[in-house]
Image (cartoon, helix red, strand yellow):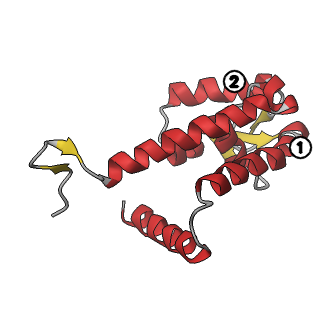
Amino acid sequence: MYELTDSSTDEPRTDIGYLVQRLRGEILAAINGELGADERLGRLHVSLAQLVILALLAPEGGATASDVCKVMSYGTGAMSRLVDRLARKGLIRRRRNCEDRRRVTLELTDEGRAVLPKMWEICANVTGRILRSFTEEEIRQLERLLVRALETA
């Protein structure tokens, strides 16, 4: 069984969960900092959480708020606030389903589609900086391991 702490010191050792959480925090901080520093995106005050929503809505047809909640593991209240902010910024819109008026689909506006490439560029730059000491094979191995971990989660 995998041990979370070093029993001789009772300190977290190189615990995978701890390391993943620390890396997540570093990535979030770096991406949010660069999003804020970008002239156009900085004015929109777009966060990484909002970027994830925009990315999920990028395919034609959009998605429901419920679908996005499930992917992001957010509660409905938090998701509603994020969606409201993105709608006020003009990046997404709500569209009622013609057959079922209770069903609302979220979709990107033209402005939302226009800012997404720059957001992806920022994410790629941050990821590239973090992985710059890795070989190409190590990066592919990390991808495979992360996908496998997600598939078994």
Q: Nearer the viewer, residue 37 or 146?
A: 37
Residue placed at 9% from the left, 48% from the top? 8
Residue placed at 67% from the left, 29% from the top? 83
Q: Is residue 103 visible?
A: no
Image quadrant occupied by the N terminus = bottom left
Q: Nearer the viewer, residue 145 or 90?
A: 145
Please give the residue where the numbered disc 2 appears in the rendered image.
Answer: 84
**Residue 25 — which label?**
none
Element under label 2?
helix
Element under label 1?
helix
Q: Is residue 130 visible?
A: yes
Quarter residue 93 falls in = top right
Q: Position of residue 101 (x, y in %)?
A: 70, 35
The residue type indicated by label 2 comes to Asp
Please give the residue where the numbered disc 1 appears in the rendered image.
Answer: 114
Q: Is residue 47 above or below residue 55?
A: above
Image quadrant occupied by the C terminus = bottom left
Q: Position of residue 87 (x, y in %)?
A: 76, 27
Q: Is residue 23 left or right of residue 55?
A: left
Residue placed at 82% from the left, 45% from the top? 118
Quarter residue 82 falls in = top right
The residue type indicated by label 1 comes to Ala
Q: Position of residue 80 (x, y in %)?
A: 60, 27
Q: Nearer the viewer, residue 109 or 41?
A: 41
Of callouts 1 and 2, which one flags the residue occurring earlier in the amino acid sequence?
Answer: 2
Q: Position of residue 136 (x, y in %)?
A: 61, 74
